[in-house]
Amino acid sequence: MKIRSTTPAAVAAAALLAATLPLAVAGSAQAGGSDGRVINTGSCSGSTDWKMKAKPDDGRIEVEAEIDSNRTGQSWTWVLRHDGGVTARGTSVTRGRSGSFSVERRTVDADGTDQFTFRAVNPATDEVCVATVAL
């Protein structure tokens, strides 16, 4: 029976890899600066992109979600959830040269990490966007 030994360098390399792996998987999340802002970006099921931001704001959390389809006049239905519960819902239309819309809300700052999910659907194309951010 052969016994393998692990060198301290191999242990350190494995620890470093394990520590950085979650960062590589969640690479689209970014810290936004000294104000505590967190920004997350991604793509929808079609050609549309999303961006979601959250930051502390006078004991509450300001959360903003943006949908950018590059097409003006599209109607989207959306739902904003905070820790699983519905915080807001509505319908928005893309506007301007960028063909985008954004939704901004101020919510309570619950104990621990606050999880936000913004889901938008374009009923005309069936495109779905699911944006998430945690603060």
Image (tube, rainbow, N blue to C red):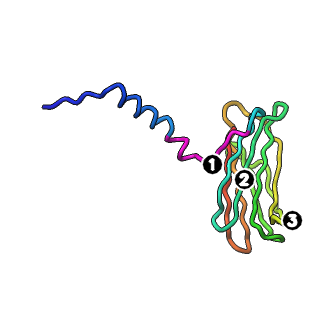
For this rendering, which residue is in front, 10 or 99?
10
Residue extending furthest toward the front: 9
Query: Which mark, residue 28?
Result: 1
Is residue 15 depicted above or below 44 in this figure?
A: above
Q: What residue is shown with label 2?
A: 51
Q: Which label's residue is closer to the chain start, 3 or 2?
A: 2
Q: Which percent across, then down, holds residue 31?
A: 69, 39
**Residue furthest left as drawn:** 1
Q: Which residues are magenta?
A: 21-32
Instruction: Name the residue located 65 percent from the left edge and 60 percent from the top edge.
Output: 43
The residue closer to the viewer here, 99 or 125, is 99
- Disc with the residue nearer the chain's start (3 vs 1): 1
Read off the residue under disc 3: 96
Residue occupying the point 72% across, 64% down: 121
Q: CA distance from mark 3 to mark 1?
A: 26 Å
Task: Name the image quarter holding the C terminus.
Answer: top right
The x and y percentages for residue 6 are 29, 28
Among the 4 quarters of the image, the one containing residue 134: top right
Q: Is residue 29 magenta?
A: yes
Give the vertical position of 21 relative to 125 (above or below).
Answer: above
Callout 2: 10 Å neighbours few (<14), some, many (20+)? many
SS assignment at label 2: strand
Label 1 packing within 10 angstroms: few (<14), some (14-19), many (20+): few
Find out whether residue 56 is within the magenta segment.
Answer: no
The amino acid type of the residue labelled 2 equals Lys
Residue lying furthest bottom:
124
